[in-house]
Image (spheres, rainbow, N blue to C red):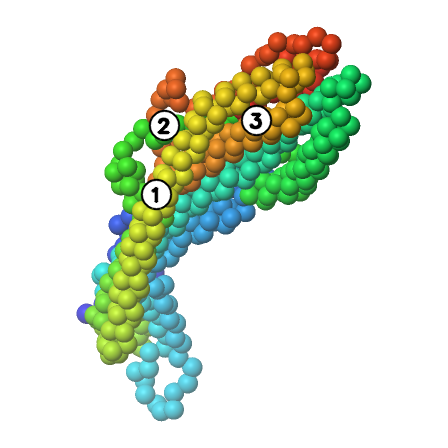
């Protein structure tokens, strides 16, 4: 249709643009943006951003977890990738930009008086209707997948921090136990001096005790070096700067078993965010296949052209026009569809593999938790009381010259090994529980601690009768006199 008589090109252009939508909104775009905003509110500033009041590092495990969530570079990178994927949704549903053309008559080789002196046009292209929505769905599904992987990384980081923390805690607890045992050996050495004077012991007995004490001192010195390495590992896993203090206080959580059935834990493990991310990446590839399929259908273009007509001054015309894009390269589009479908199949296959590994990891984590629970219960409620009673009996007999140095040293070594095994079992249980929650993808409910089950309270050595004339017994001596109380538990 041709419109004439003083038609304004600006009016026609504005009318065309008002009819053009900004694009097709993706199915999940609003939900994805809501998730990102909720995460931003929960985490506060983006991970790694400077804060006015830095979060202190330690001494509780929860402090280390918060610090890592705020500052770890890997988490900051994952969060940034998630944010970037959300911001890519809007460009994916964007229409091509309108094209505006201008023309002005400059020269004519003939004497034709019907030349159009000037012209202007605006044109907007539209792809097949499902192309833009499919592209937005692909971007939104990718953003949802990256949000799931961000959550999975949080779980991984929690497990890594817990493992590094309790490795450091165990080294310090081991050193405390060995230092207490070293004090006992020194007391035995001094007690042997008195017995040598009375003929109840020999110089060889004292030399044997001093040899064991020297080896224990060397083991403690080795723990100091291991502690430095463990501190560096803790700083690295939480993103702390070199030289930051890494205090550890408090006992591990109570050594318990899961209160939930194995079937419930397995279901939760199969719903893990990392496994769910593969299904979402498959959805993204399916959406890309739909976008490629939409390219096989014609596209459209609408526009309007303003013409300055020859002849009478001020005479003009407006010419609406419609165009069609012809998808001639059908083979190329078909290959694009096949590529997207193959990628979707690969993503789902990876998800199936991750599910199989999750089931195996769950079985392993449950096995380690139950084994650590068994070892802690055995050491705390059976072996430790027996070793304490045996050691007290042997030590009392030794001070009255009714037992040998070898018997005293053997009883002390057995008590030391049991206390160290108990500390190891508790640390193993804390790490295994963190691994279990990492595999399950959420907090696991703990069973109630029974009176006969292992607890987080440190066991105490039972006092024995002090024998006069042989010095103070390190078991009954006040902690202020012998440095620390003998116990096989955690720091209070």
Question: Is the Cβ of the residue at disc 2 closer than 8 Å to that at disc 1?
Answer: no
Locate residue 468 relative to residue 84 in the image: left or right.
right
Callout 2: helix, strand or loop? Answer: loop
Q: Residues within 10 Å of mark 1 (few under 14, many from 20)?
A: many
Residue tagged 2 = 446
> As displayed, is residue 264 above or below residue 286?
above
Measure the alpha-carbon separation of dots 3 and 2.
30 Å
Q: Residue furthest right?
A: 197
Locate residue 114 relative to residue 254 in the image: left or right.
left
Q: Quadrant of the C terminus?
A: top right
- Which is more toward the observer, 288 or 268? 268
Question: Is the Cβ of the residue at disc 3 closer than 8 Å to that at disc 2?
Answer: no
Residue tagged 1 = 362
> As displayed, is residue 359 above or below residue 96?
above
Locate residue 229 relative to residue 99 in the image: left or right.
right
Q: Residue furthest bottom?
A: 110
Residue at the image position 60 percent from the left and 12 percent from the top:
464
Residue 316 seen in render = no
In this rendering, which labeled residue sits more in front, label 3 or label 1? 3
Callout 3: helix, strand or loop? Answer: helix
Residue at the image position 55 percent from the left and 20 percent from the top:
390
Residue 266 seen in render = yes
- Residue 430: x %, y % from top left: 46, 33
Residue tagged 3 = 415
- Which is more toward the observer, 8 or 328? 328
Nearest to N terminus: mark 3 or mark 2: 3
């Amino acid at each position: 249709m041709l419109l004439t008589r003083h038609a304004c090109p600006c009016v026609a252009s504005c009318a065309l643009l008002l009819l053009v939508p900004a694009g097709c909104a993706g199915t999940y775009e609003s939900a994805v943006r809501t998730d990102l905003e909720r995460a931003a509110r929960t985490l506060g500033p983006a991970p790694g951003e400077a804060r006015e009041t830095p979060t202190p590092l330690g001494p509780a495990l929860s402090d280390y977890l918060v610090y890592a969530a705020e500052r770890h570079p890997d988490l900051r990178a994952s969060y940034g990738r998630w944010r970037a994927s959300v911001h890519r949704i809007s460009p994916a549903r964007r229409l091509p930009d309108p094209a505006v053309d201008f023309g002005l008559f400059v020269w004519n080789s003939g004497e034709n008086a019907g030349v159009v002196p000037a012209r202007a046009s605006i044109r907007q292209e539209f792809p097949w209707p499902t192309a833009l929505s499919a592209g937005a769905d692909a971007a939104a599904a990718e953003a949802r997948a990256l949000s799931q992987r961000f959550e999975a990384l949080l779980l991984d980081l929690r497990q890594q921090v817990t493992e590094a923390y309790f490795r450091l805690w165990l080294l310090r607890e081991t050193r405390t136990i060995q230092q207490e045992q070293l004090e006992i050996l020194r007391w035995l050495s001094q007690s042997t001096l008195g017995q040598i004077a009375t003929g109840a012991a020999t110089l060889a007995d004292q030399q044997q005790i001093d040899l064991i004490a020297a080896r224990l001192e060397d083991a403690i010195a080795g723990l100091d070096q291991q502690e430095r390495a463990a501190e560096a590992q803790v700083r690295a896993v939480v993103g702390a700067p070199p030289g930051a203090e890494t205090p550890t206080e408090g006992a591990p959580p109570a050594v318990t078993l899961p209160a939930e059935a194995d079937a419930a834990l397995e279901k939760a493990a199969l719903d893990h965010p990392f496994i769910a991310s593969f299904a979402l990446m498959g959805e993204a590839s399916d959406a890309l296949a739909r976008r490629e399929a939409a390219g096989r259908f014609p596209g459209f273009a609408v526009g309007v052209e303003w013409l300055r007509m020859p002849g009478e001054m001020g005479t003009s015309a407006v010419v609406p026009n419609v165009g069609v894009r012809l998808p001639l390269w059908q083979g190329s589009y078909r290959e694009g569809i096949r590529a997207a479908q193959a990628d979707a199949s690969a993503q789902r296959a990876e998800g199936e593999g991750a599910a199989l590994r999750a089931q195996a990891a769950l079985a392993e984590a449950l096995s380690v938790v139950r084994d650590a629970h068994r070892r802690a219960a055995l050491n705390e409620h059976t072996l430790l009381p027996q070793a304490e009673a045996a050691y007290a009996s042997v030590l009392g007999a030794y001070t009255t010259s009714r037992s040998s140095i070898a018997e005293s040293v053997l009883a002390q070594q057995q008590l030391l090994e049991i206390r160290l095994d108990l500390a190891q079992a508790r640390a193993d249980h804390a790490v295994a529980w963190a691994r279990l929650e990492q595999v399950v993808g959420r907090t696991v409910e703990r069973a109630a601690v029974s009176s006969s089950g292992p607890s987080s309270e440190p066991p105490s050595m039972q006092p024995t009768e002090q024998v006069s004339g042989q010095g103070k017994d390190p078991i009954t001596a006040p902690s202020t006199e012998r440095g620390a109380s003998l116990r096989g538990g955690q720091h209070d």
